[in-house]
Image: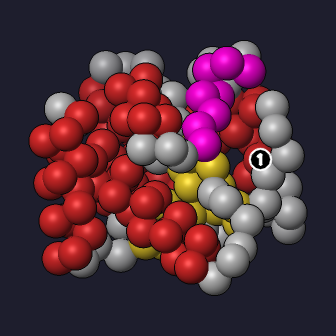
Amino acid sequence: MIPHERLFFDSSAIVKYYVDESGSDYVKNLIVSINKNTIFVTRVTKVEVTAVFARQLKARRLTQSYVDNAVRVFHHHFTSKYFVVEITRDLLDRATDFATRHALRGYDAVQLAAMWEVADERISQGLSPIVLVSADVELNDAATSEGLAVENPNDFP
């Protein structure tokens, strides 16, 4: 584990804060350290994480009351704790390129493009690099091949 300041969470990682699974303790430590860590997410993360809750409920892995609370807390954090990267035409163009180059799923390509946008901005301002926190192996491989730093919370069970 490396020290952090700026983190970009994809949905596979951020959901671990709200649903206990492998890597949840690691994610919780990063998010609780919000005063030390700036956490970026993309706008589609709201959809993806909410969908995880709904699918967990449908599969009866979570109760309705648990999901209601998790959605409420996540939506609050989404607007108050996390820096949200908006979806733009340029970002989608870059995502299309990443989807083609790395054979990524659509939202994974959007996640990578959003992270790259934040990384570009930080580099242009001479700021410290950003780290992708993701449990998605294909996304992590694509990010690594693009020269981005990656940590998989599943490596820290």
Left or right: 154 in relation to 10: right
How many neighbours does mark 1 have within 10 angstroms: few (below 14), some (14-19), or many (20 or more)? many
In x, y percent, where is residue 141? 42, 28
Above or below, 56 against 129 in this view is above
Name the image quarter holding residue 58: top left
- Please count the marks in the image: 1
* Mark 1 element type: helix
Residue at x-position 53% and y-position 64%:
119
Tell me if I can see residue 47 in this picture: no
Q: Answer whether residue 151 is magenta in the image.
A: yes
Q: Answer whether residue 25 is magenta in the image.
A: no
Tell me if I can see residue 93 in this picture: yes
Above or below, 154 against 116 in this view is above
Residue at x-position 19% and y-position 65%:
92
In x, y percent, where is residue 46? 38, 58
Residue stretch rendered in magenta on the structure: 149-156
Left or right: 20 in relation to 36: left
| Residue type at tag 1 | Leu
Q: Which quarter of the rendering shows the N terminus?
A: top right
In x, y percent, where is residue 134? 52, 36
Pick the residue in front: 79 or 30: 30
Residue at x-position 28% and y-position 55%:
110
Q: Mark 1 points at which residue?
A: 30
In x, y percent, where is residue 86? 35, 76
Residue at x-position 74% and y-position 21%:
156
Name the image quarter holding residue 94: bottom left
Name the image quarter holding residue 20: top right
Above or below, 132 against 140 in this view is below
Say how the picture is coloured.
secondary structure
Left or right: 34 in relation to 64: right
Pick the residue in front: 118 or 28: 118
